[in-house]
Image (cartoon, rainbow, N blue to C red):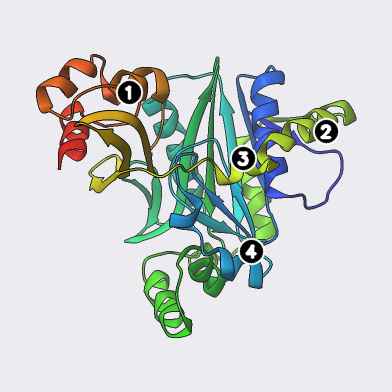
Amino acid sequence: MKYIALPEKRVRRLSFYLAMEEYVARHIEAPDCFFMWQVEPSVIFGRNQLIENEVNLDYCRANNIHTYRRKSGGGCVYADMKNIMFSYITDEDNVNFTFNRYINMVVLTLVKLGVDARASGRNDVMIGDRKVSGSAFYRLPGRSIVHSTMLYDTDMRNMVGAITPSNEKLLSKGVESVRQHIALLKDYADISLEDFKAFVRQNLCDGEIMLTETDIRGIEELEQEYLAPAFIYGKNPSYTLVRKRRIDGVGELEARMEVKNDRIKAINLVGDYFLIGALDDQILQPLIGTELREEALQEALKGDTADVIMNLKKEDLIRLLLE
């Protein structure tokens, strides 16, 4: 696997590194690529999430925390200079194989440090019963991208405050609660953050590809898409029905529908699920004009919904729409 290096060492906006992943996937001809990055305090939320549901914008503005949307699914996370972000780009297009391969690489790297790490659930790495890393995935034609957090250390107050609207009392309780459920690597491995980064690179990569100034300009041009307000904030028209539930193996799924005479006139699915297919073409468009009745929904959803949203069974989606 090749390490993708930048010609200059400086901290850029989180949007630059998202664009860098995409640029590498589209332009760098190496079957497996990897790089690490760190950012000033930032919140990054999933492709299909509503920012007002996930981010405490008032807290972020007051504490100079930036907000960004990524193109992968999954949930909202906080990042700062005390933790590390990993990016993995591969030619492999099987979602489950890619996830399993990548997460196992991360687990084995931690085990080599003497850390009792293991994979858990759909995308997490655990130390004991605490989460130290979470991952998200998306696919481009011919390439797959996985990115993840690695909690070496972090500002716990910002982590809780930025993604959980709360007053000071709830904030202090939230820090205590979250701290009981996450692992900070510094507490489990006697290694500095910089030495850990070097250890990861040495164990995962066998060579380097240095990006050129032309590559940097290409990344910066692509970055503008991630900075566009329409991409960050999305379009959230009003809906007459909102139905939400958590589905095992899928995550939070919220159906927002405009319904008239018991027929769906408009629909969107938001949440922290992993999108692996064409949501509009395979699920949303076929539902437009469909009567909110089980038989009609079954007829409209002809394909396998699990080919679009990871692990989503058709019957679970229909149950959500009807409940």
Residue on which the image places disc 3: 230
Q: Are discs 1 and 2 less than 8 Å apart at CB?
A: no
Which secondary structure lies at badge 1?
A: helix
Q: Residue at x 50, y 69 (%)?
A: 187
Q: Are discs 2 and 3 less than 8 Å apart at CB?
A: no
- Judged from this view, the residue extending furthest toward the front is 261
Mark drawn on residue 283 = 1
Q: CA distance from mark 3 to mark 1?
A: 23 Å
Mark with earlier residue (3, 1): 3
Where is residue 101, by image quadrant? top left
Mark with earlier residue (1, 2): 2
Q: CA distance from mark 2 to mark 3?
A: 24 Å
143 or 290: nearer the viewer: 290
Up the image or down, 264 lies above or below 246; here it is above
Residue on which the image places disc 4: 82
Mark with earlier residue (3, 4): 4
Which secondary structure lies at badge 4?
A: loop
Q: CA distance from mark 4 to mark 1?
A: 40 Å
Quadrant holding the N terminus: top right
Mark with earlier residue (2, 3): 2
